[in-house]
Image (cartoon, rainbow, N blue to C red):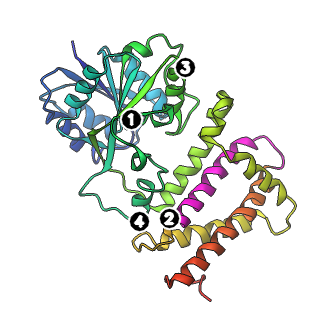
């Protein structure tokens, strides 16, 4: 019998899976463990890679879903096969340090209470180039993970159940009516929603910064803005299920709704105008991906916040006949002040501005 089941959803990761699997073959633990890797309907050769890999130090269980259904469904499929008392959730882009499994087991031995989950640390891989956007979201911006603000050994709430590197005792999962909620179709908030339900049963999350997974996932500003928009959509799904989380997940959403209505009848707030404003904001942010400046955290935070709340508003107004006009009103009320403020800051500080923003 295995001591640990590692559950890893995989999607179109054939080009990099070998490195991840080899890292599990380098684990220092002497305890038997398994990796349950679920191909979530990939269109590449992900399942072939999983099926052909021959592990030396662990048991590999490759599963395949016929269609892409999102990480919730994939993890649930993995949980169905897992029998170990400790389950570790990881991403297919996370390469574990050699003591990864051993450190998770040690943390659970030190905290045997079945309600305690152990959160490890996720850090950019040393050999992965880091642009200014990646440093921001993993740093002061904390839009990806909040490790910048976390302190080793401290306890954190359900929002920190990061399934890139977190372990839990299977015992606390058993009584639940369901595990990960499949209505979260994107990789956003499905893990926090499970942790929220577990917190109602006494679930706790302790942070151990010594348990490290190296993150191989390059982001541009454009790719992360798209991710934030999807997060906003899933945030509204979360709030609909649990209205009392609003203060944690969408604390400012009604301010943004008010802004959308305030500019609803602005004749300039057309869909084409929205596309133009968003393109300018993205162009400005992308211009500095490899050129840091002292005002960049402001620009990144504000524009990413715009896309996050745009996603939420898309979900909130999904069935409204005014949806497009409200989104246009929101864009008109939100983006121009952000751009004006950054351009002023940049001009005052002598920061170079791209074409179209000078003068």
Q: Which residue is mark 1?
A: 154
Label 4 near label 3: C-beta < 8 Å? no
Label 3 near label 1: C-beta < 8 Å? no
Q: Nearer the viewer, mark 3 or mark 4?
A: 3
Q: Nearer the viewer, mark 1 or mark 2?
A: 1
Mark 1 or 4, nearer chain start? 4
Which element type, helix, strand or loop, lies under badge 3?
loop
Q: Nearer the viewer, mark 1 or mark 3?
A: 1
Q: CA distance from mark 4 to mark 2?
A: 9 Å
Q: CA distance from mark 1 to mark 2?
A: 27 Å
The magenta stretch is 298-322
Q: Residue at x 60, y 39 (%)?
A: 248
Which element type, helix, strand or loop, lies under badge 2?
helix
Q: Nearer the viewer, mark 1 or mark 4?
A: 1
Does residue 248 appear in this view? Answer: yes
Using the image, tell me which numbered label, if any, was put on residue 297: 2
Q: Residue at x 16, y 30 (%)?
A: 55
Q: Residue at x 38, y 12 (%)?
A: 171
In magenta segment, residue 300: yes
Q: Which residue is mark 3?
A: 200
Q: Residue at x 53, y 39 (%)?
A: 186
Which element type, helix, strand or loop, lies under badge 1?
loop
Q: Quadrant of the C terminus?
A: bottom right
Label 2 near label 4: C-beta < 8 Å? no
Mark 1 or 2, nearer chain start? 1
Q: Main secondary structure of the magenta part?
A: helix
Q: 8 above or below 358?
A: above
Mark 4 or 2, nearer chain start? 4
Q: CA distance from mark 1 to mark 3?
A: 19 Å
Q: Which residue is mark 4?
A: 132
Mark 1 or 3, nearer chain start? 1
In magenta segment, residue 29: no
């Amino acid at each position: 019998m295995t001591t640990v089941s590692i559950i890893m959803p995989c999607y179109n990761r054939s080009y990099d899976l070998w490195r991840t699997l080899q890292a599990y073959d380098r684990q220092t633990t002497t305890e038997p463990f398994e990796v349950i890797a679920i191909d979530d309907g990939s269109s590449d050769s992900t399942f072939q890679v999983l099926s052909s890999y021959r592990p030396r130090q662990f048991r590999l269980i490759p599963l395949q879903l016929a269609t892409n259904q999102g990480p919730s469904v994939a993890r649930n499929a993995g949980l169905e096969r897992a029998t170990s008392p400790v389950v570790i959730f990881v991403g297919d882009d996370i390469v574990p340090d050699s003591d990864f499994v051993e450190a998770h087991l040690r943390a659970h031995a030190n905290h045997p209470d079945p309600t305690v989950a152990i959160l490890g640390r996720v850090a950019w891989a040393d050999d992965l180039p880091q642009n200014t956007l990646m440093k921001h979201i993993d740093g002061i911006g904390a839009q990806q993970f909040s490790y910048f603000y976390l302190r080793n050994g401290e306890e954190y709430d359900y929002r920190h159940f990061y399934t890139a590197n977190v372990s839990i005792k299977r015992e606390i999962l058993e009584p639940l009516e369901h595990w990960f909620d499949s209505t979260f179709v994107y990789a956003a908030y499905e893990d926090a929603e499970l942790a929220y339900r577990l917190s109602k049963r006494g679930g706790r999350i302790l942070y151990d910064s010594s348990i490290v997974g190296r993150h191989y996932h390059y982001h541009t500003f454009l790719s992360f803005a798209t991710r934030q928009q999807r997060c906003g959509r899933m945030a509204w799904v979360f709030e609909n299920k649990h209205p009392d989380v609003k203060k944690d997940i969408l604390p400012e959403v009604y301010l943004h709704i008010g802004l959308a209505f305030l500019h609803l009848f602005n004749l300039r707030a057309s869909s084409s105008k929205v596309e133009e404003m968003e393109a300018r904001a993205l162009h400005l942010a992308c211009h500095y991906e490899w050129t840091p400046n002292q005002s960049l955290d402001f620009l990144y935070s504000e524009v990413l916040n715009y896309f996050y709340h745009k996603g939420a508003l898309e979900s909130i107004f999904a069935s409204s006949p005014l949806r497009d006009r409200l989104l246009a009103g929101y864009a008109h009320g939100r983006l121009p002040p952000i751009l004006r403020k950054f351009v002023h800051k940049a001009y005052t500080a002598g920061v170079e501005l791209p074409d179209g923003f000078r003068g």
